[in-house]
Amino acid sequence: MGAELTVGPPDIVVDFSAAWVQVGPDDDLAGWASAAAQRIWALGGGPPSRLDAEILAAEFTVLAKVAFAVPSFGALVFCPEPSRGPRACVRLMGLRYSPGIEESSIVEEFLLPAEQQLLPPEVEQSTDAGLRRIRIRQRAWSADTGRVADHIAYLFPCDEGAWALTTSLPDPHEAELMLADLDQLAASVQLQGCAVTGPVARPPQDPSPSTEARGPFAVVLPDGMVEGCLLPPSSAPAAKRSPSPT
């Protein structure tokens, strides 16, 4: 038997703007990417050429595959200007943890190793619109690629679990420009029943009792299984048009 865990966070609604496109772990990525590219180009004043649509769809597909390399409920891709390509890809993850665990311990699970940090991590509480949340921003280098990236996470702690929005941006300057858009997305997260639009994320109601959770934290997988400890996301590979966010 694994460690005793909380039942999981409450249902939420993420009410995002039209510049974001949502993808789920069970979606047909090719079909989703093609439809999303057409919609984003239409919002940008399209219609696009066939090549433009195919390029954007290919970028969407790559980002979705990278996003779901880490177990998550879904991902949101930010693309306000289709000619520039996607600017960010944000994962939505759910967490369970040992009852009574300190909030500071939850934050620590998101921190990268100290030897990779280029700046002290920024950990800020937010109590404005939306759910109470903690923004964690880290600038770090990857031992595998040698690249520098900004890793940004929004943690929504609740009594029985937490939600997290996470992304990594390979260009620190772009990360600075993107911060307001990411903050706005995080502010749109609300408990179900407090909003009337947006996709709903639900934790599994009957997690498998035979699945062992290693440590006080566990990622809530889309199929209801519990698997291991939460790890910070890795950087995505660079895209042709611009550094590829994840």
Image: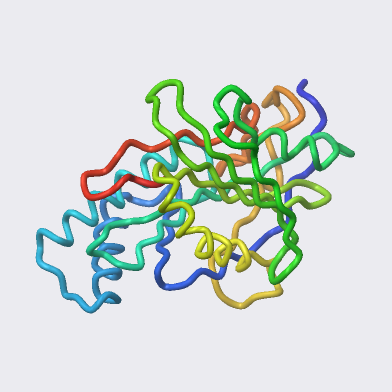
Q: Nearer the viewer, residue 107 or 25?
A: 107
- The image shows residue 3 at horizontal and vertical percentages of 80, 25
| Quadrant hosting residue 115 | top right
Residue ID at (43%, 48%): 26
Residue ID at (43%, 43%): 67
Q: Quadrant of the C terminus?
A: top left
Q: Is residue 103 left or right of residue 23?
A: right
- The image shows residue 196 at horizontal and vertical percentages of 61, 78
Q: Is residue 146 left or right of residue 218?
A: left
| Quadrant hosting residue 207 | top right
Q: How many marks?
A: 0
Q: Nearer the viewer, residue 21 or 31?
A: 21
Q: Nearer the viewer, residue 27 or 62?
A: 62
- The image shows residue 69 at horizontal and vertical percentages of 44, 35
Q: Is residue 83 left or right of residue 188?
A: left
- The image shows residue 187 at horizontal and vertical percentages of 63, 66
Residue ID at (51%, 36%): 233
Q: Quadrant of the N terminus?
A: top right
Q: Is residue 79 above or below residue 110?
A: below
